[in-house]
Image: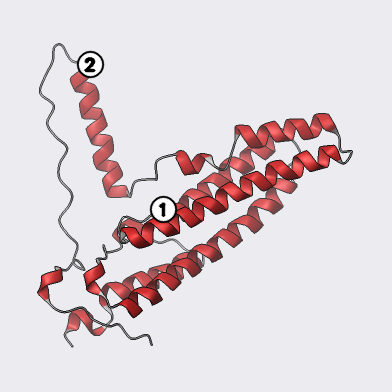
Amino acid sequence: MNGFWGDGGPYETWVGALRTWQRGEPVDLAALPALEREQFTADTWARLTRHILTAVDVRLKDWARRFQQAFDQAPDEFSAGRELTQAREGLRAIRALAGHAGLPPDIRTPVGELCDRHIRSVQEQLEHSLTVAARDGGDPDRLDQRLRTVRDNALTAVVVDPPPLPSARRARFTALRRSLGRERSGPGRREVRPAPGPPSAGPWATDADEGPRRRIMPD
């Protein structure tokens, strides 16, 4: 076994990052290596998928606990709207992992869909609880205001918003937008050059033809 695979390589990099991210600690998701199906055997992919699902589940539960506590204590609609806005930022961080471009589509897509279904469910539960409270004799004006706040600041906005770009891609995208803005506002039509290509592969990137798939045995 060579030095590249001696420490588990990309598999251990991802698992270590997932464990850190699961605890709510900072992780540079953009630095995670891209994974290809040819890199691992089926059982290794199954273990990695379990790590991903566990991490997402833990973060969603922690997010729900924190949000519910803060939202229930919001004394007015401004405070409630602020909590919903902050909650969406937490959800975007979770979706950034669930929809990470470095994951194969057959993992990234179902994990992302699972996350989005959870977000839609929470939004529905919020609206339903306020409707039931009003039907059960609660202050109709206050509850109607809170329902409007929940709908105007819907958690599901993160499902339709574009996912946040990793820092390096964001910088290139911002530069491109500025360049296009100058082209459009300048005197006359000028040639707009295409955006630069993707960065070169990182040190963990491998070619499927370089060798057979490896089975990564857990510690």
Is residue 163 found left or right of 65 in the rendered image?
left
Q: Is residue 97 above or below residue 77?
A: below
**Position of residue 99 measured from the top left corner of the image (x, y, whole percent):** 39, 54
Classed neighbour count for the residue bearing mark 2: other residues with Cα under 10 Å, few (<14), some (14–19), many (≥20) = few
Residue 28 seen anywhere in this rendered image of the structure? no
Q: In the image, what residue type sits under mark 1?
A: Ala
Q: Which residue is mark 1?
A: 96
- What residue is rendered at 22% in x and 34% in y? 176
Residue 82, quarter of picture: top right
Residue 45, quarter of picture: bottom left
In the foreground, 64 or 69: 64
Q: Tell me, yes or no, whether the two marked residues, 2 and 1, touch with CB atoms within 8 Å.
A: no
Dividing the image into 4 quarters, which one contains the C terminus? bottom left
- What residue is rendered at 56% in x and 59% in y? 60
- What residue is rendered at 56% in x and 53% in y? 118
- Mark 2 or mark 1: whose residue is earlier in sequence: 1
Residue 134 seen anywhere in this rendered image of the structure? yes
Mark 1: secondary structure: helix
In the foreground, 154 or 179: 154
Mark 2: secondary structure: helix
In the foreground, 153 or 116: 116
Q: Which residue is mark 2?
A: 185
Tell me how the rendering is colored.
secondary structure
Q: Is residue 1 above or below residue 178?
A: below
- What residue is rendered at 61% in x and 42% in y? 84
Q: Is residue 188 above or below residue 214?
A: above
Is residue 77 found left or right of 209 in the rendered image?
right
**Position of residue 9 measured from the top left corner of the image (x, y, whole percent):** 26, 76
